Image (tube, rainbow, N blue to C red):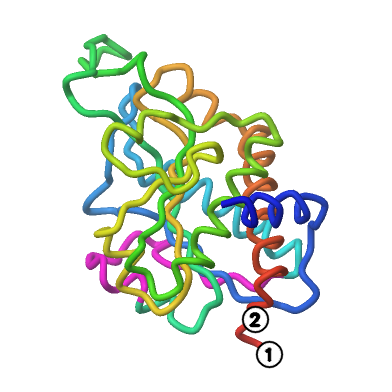
Amino acid sequence: MSKLFLSISALLGITQVHASPLVAVDVGHGLVDGGAISARGRNEFEFNRQFAGILATTLEERRITVRRVNFAGDIGSLDERPRQAAGSDFFLSVHHDSVSPAYLQSWTWAGRELSYTEVKRGFGLFVSAQNPDPGSSLLCASTIGAMLRRNGFVPSTWHGRKHLAADAENGVWYYDNLVVLYRTTLPAVLFEAGVIKHRDEELELLDRQRQARMADAVATGIAACLFVTGKSARD
């Protein structure tokens, strides 16, 4: 891992790639399967689509071409997501996290009985060892995580309960059997932006300035990673 950390350190000052790579940004879940429910009753898909839109715009401002996947929320098959991303240089699936029922508490919000947690918060990044390019996937995940940490975001250590560490310091974990990560032809990372079941973090994840700062960190990490790997579908 020492070479990886050296690579990340060398890349932290890079904000734009020289070529014009193609990045697929996938909105996790959809209109039918909305994903997790936040502490205040919003479905995860709403969080995912909002942040993915900000990230896509931020990438384009860096002259990175973006392929938008599932922004309409109408993709029903997990296999269809990597199929639509085929031909891109990198695939990022945007999600927001929850926690198992054993760690939930009940409360009433706006007249609704809902649940929340106080034990889990923070971002997480996932890669699969079964991905066709696990090295690039891990490098990009670690670079994204390093940039997030550099900008004040804190990774969740909770994932270590279920997943092997790929780069725990930067919030990266293995999730080998995740369809969107291994049934693809390109480097792929799943990004959990934060825990919407945590009442405080839910509000933070909806803060526009914070969203912009997080999107900038993720976009910088992607740009830096693609720069060092030299990947561009347009070359």
| Residue at 67% from the left image edge and 46% from the top image edge | 217
Q: Are marks 1 and 2 in contact (CB under 8 Å)?
A: yes
Instruction: Look at the picture and state if 115 lies above or below 81.
Output: above
| Residue at 82% from the left image edge and 51% from the top image edge | 13
Disc 2 crowd, CA 10 A, few/some/many (<14, 14-19, 20+): many
Q: Nearer the viewer, residue 235 or 73?
A: 235
Considering the image in quadrants, where does the C terminus appear? bottom right
| Residue at 48% from the left image edge and 60% from the top image edge | 92
Instruction: Look at the picture and state if 81 lies above or below 193.
Output: below
User: In this picture, which residue range is highlighted in magenta?
Assistant: 64-82
What is the distance, in whole Å, between disc 1 and disc 2 at their CAs?
6 Å
Which amino acid type is marked by label 2?
A: Ser
Name the residue carrying label 2: 232
Q: Position of residue 110 (x, y in %)?
A: 32, 14
Which amino acid type is marked by label 1?
A: Asp
How many numbered marks are there?
A: 2
| Residue at 46% from the left image edge and 75% from the top image edge | 186
Q: Nearer the viewer, residue 61 or 151?
A: 151
Q: Position of residue 30 (x, y in %)?
A: 30, 54
Label 2 secondary element: loop
Name the residue carrying label 1: 235
**Side of 139 where 45 appears, left or right:** left
Q: Position of residue 17 (x, y in %)?
A: 77, 69
